[in-house]
Image (spheres, grey):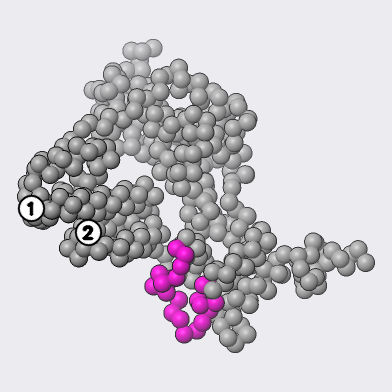
Amino acid sequence: MTRKALTCDNCGIEGRRYRRGLCGPCALAEDLDTVLDDGSGQVRPELLPFRDGMAAMRSPRAGVSWLARPHVEQMLRTLAMPERPLTHETLDGMTPWRSVAYLRDLLMQHGVLPRVDRHLVLFGRWLGERLNEIDQPEQRKLVERFASWHVQRRLRAFADRGPVTEQQTQQAREEIRQALGFLAWLHQRDRRLATCRQADIDAWYAQGYIAHRLTQAFLRWAMSNKLLVKVTIPHRSTVNPAPLDQHHHLAVIRALLTEETIPLLTRVAALLMLLYAQPLTRILKLTLDDVLDADGELSIRLGDPPIPVPEPFAGLLRQHLQQRLNLTTATNRDARWLFPGRRAGQPMVTSTIEIRLRKHGIFALNGRTAALRQLVLQAPAPVVATMLGYSHDHTARTATTAGTTWSRYAPGDHTRLQDRRTDDS
């Protein structure tokens, strides 16, 4: 009697029953077969890879709960209809957008839909909604042109080089908002873009330079397209915040290496930033293939060649590799990301890591700048640039600011490097 209660009536595998004698995986498979039925009693053939991938998720209860949401069920039943094309355009017509984005990621992950850049798609959807809210035809036409020929063109160029980041689309949205705000403000002053003059520009920025700083993208575009007379855009230096001093920098690293109350993921991400001067956007693009373990010696590929990972950080990194988050659902079950996200095929987003760091008093830009300054004091800027994946210009500027004595070292000048080491010894 006890054995029967712990055995699935469908697959015969011993385990906890989920409902009506079915275990969790069988209950999830049953729900998938129902919601993806194309009307013939079978799953629509094109959706079989999606169905099989979902059915194999490690946490079937989460899958059952997701399928039970009315809007999710409706979206999937729509996609299961043979007469509906399985395309990105079909998804574009669905709501709510967050659920659509999640489903799109899953469908791309399982090969049902071709790969597209998710942030580029989300921006396009957001832009369409914002344009539909504009009542003034002239304003809408201007913003639509600006978005098409400047903002989206730039994002597509980013996508050609690699995945568009959350920060890039955030800036793109803010540039659109600033353009809309500026045009509405001109309208209140009985002005149009063609009649805008320097006094208007000065008055706009006088209301708050930082808040209106990104308006410059729209203004420069308008001037280059002869839609605005030549004006001077106010400029104010936005110097990066001061880096951590060396004492504080080392104290934070020591705490991250020893303090076990800090979550492991937070410790690993912060140490990659503080030891190797990596920006969060680059840290989140790292994969398992970038962590190399040869003969017990760990290294990580940030540039060329891979850079050694010393103990005790190597031990923390190995531990993290065995305890990565967000692998129990169908989204990232086989993810290769060092920091898998909740979205299918996507790493974590930078805001998630930034919140974790701020909770422990670590600010990304200050810490990364401090790490880079310290590194260029210890080695020539070109060497640091090559190993950490930075441009030579960036590390050279940092070296100059830090007052390094490597200023005359040239890339590839190993003789001079050896002479320097000999003198120091």
Say which label, 2 or 1, has the lower sequence index: 2
Image-quadrant location for residue 312:
top right
Taking the magenta stretch, the answer to whether it contains residue 351 is: no
At horizontal 49% and vertical 39% (from top left) the residue drawn is 355
The three-letter code of the residue at mark 1 reads Thr
* Alpha-carbon span between mark 2 and mark 1: 17 Å
The three-letter code of the residue at mark 2 reads Val
User: In the image, is residue 202 above or below residue 331?
Assistant: above
On-image quarter of the N terminus: bottom right
Between disc 2 and disc 1, the foreground one is: 1
Image-quadrant location for residue 330:
bottom right
At horizontal 26% and vertical 32% (from top left) the residue drawn is 238
Q: Position of residue 131 (x, y in %)?
A: 28, 63
On-image quarter of the C terminus: top left
Considering the numbered disc 1 on the image, is that residue within a helix, a strand or a loop? helix
Q: How many marks?
A: 2
Using the image as rendered, state which of residue 2 and residue 122 is in the foreground. 122
User: In the image, is residue 147 above or below residue 12?
Assistant: above
The residue wearing badge 1 is 195
At horizontal 27% and vertical 58% (from top left) the residue drawn is 152
Alpha-carbon neighbours of circle 1 within 10 Å: few (<14), some, or many (≥20)? few
Determine whether label 2 and label 1 are within 8 Å by CB: no
Q: Is residue 342 left or right of residue 218?
A: right
User: In the image, is residue 262 above or below residue 342?
Assistant: above
- Look at the image and give the residue range highlighted in magenta: 75-97
Q: Position of residue 336 (x, y in %)?
A: 52, 52
Taking the magenta stretch, the answer to whether it contains residue 85 is: yes
Q: Can residue 89 be seen in this snapshot?
A: yes
Alpha-carbon neighbours of circle 2 within 10 Å: few (<14), some, or many (≥20)? many
The residue wearing badge 2 is 143
Q: Is residue 226 left or right of residue 128?
A: left
